[in-house]
Amino acid sequence: MKHARQTNNPRKLIVHLKPKQKLQPVNPNHWSEKSKRSVTFSIPPSHYEDIHYQCVRCGKISVFTAADQKLAFELHKAYIWQRRKLCQACWREKHRIEQRIHACQTRWRANTRELQHSVAFLKQWLKLLETYSDYGGRKNHAGITMLRRLVDASTKDEEADSQSNQNNQHP
Ligand SMILES: [Zn+2]
């Protein structure tokens, strides 16, 4: 038993010993131009502090760390009042949905004539657009309306087809 403890993965130790830095110095000169026009610029805080927030999608409590804020506002030039709404996992999922929506749009532009009758494709795209707003994405009302209409029309076509096939088979 003792021996087993000695061979424990040293990685775990590193995680425990890693100092948790909660504060990061603010350098407002590195902010974006838009951030510099905000009132905060005239009386900037001396440090970033960890911000705890609840994910709007799954409800999990997450942390926008001081270090992440410094990166976001000073390196990536995000607006100084921009806050996080999603936890890491949901943020990644939102990004994945965005990429899949983009792929649908590309396919649609290349092959509209055929795809407008593909119920499977239309339903998949519609599902993505509907799910996207659950992750705090802007709801694409026009796209959703168009796809619902096309799904309805294609479903009716399919029903009519199978009806006439049945009639052909059993006259
Ligand atoms: Zn979440």
Image: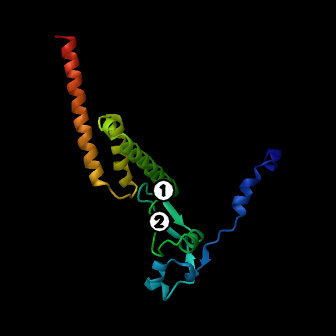
Instruction: Verify CB contact (< 8 Å) between mark 2 and mark 1.
Output: yes
Looking at the image, which is closer to me, 75 or 69? 75
- 3 to 79, vertically: above or below: above
Which of the 4 image quarters holds residue 38?
A: bottom left
Q: Position of residue 12 (x, y in %)?
A: 71, 54
Q: CA distance from mark 2 to mark 1?
A: 9 Å
- Under tag 2, what secondary structure? loop
Residue located 49% across and 58% down the image: 87
Judged left or right of residue 76, residue 54 is: left
- 46 to 111, vertically: above or below: below
What number is the disc on residue 140?
none
Q: Position of residue 83 (x, y in %)?
A: 46, 69
User: Looking at numbered disc 2 in the image, what kind of residue is underneath it?
Assistant: Arg
Judged left or right of residue 145, residue 55 is: right
Looking at the image, which is closer to me, 56 or 39? 39
What number is the disc on residue 91?
1
Residue located 25% across and 33% down the image: 155
Determine crowd level at label 2: few under 14, some 14-19, many 20+ residues with C-alpha closer than 10 A: some
Residue located 35% across and 49% down the image: 129
Q: Check the picture and name the quadrant holding the N terminus.
A: top right
Q: Which residue is mark 2?
A: 84
Q: Residue furthest left?
A: 171
Q: Mark 1: is the Cβ under 8 angstroms from ligand 1?
A: yes
User: Looking at numbered disc 1 in the image, what kind of residue is underneath it?
Assistant: Trp
- Under tag 1, what secondary structure? helix
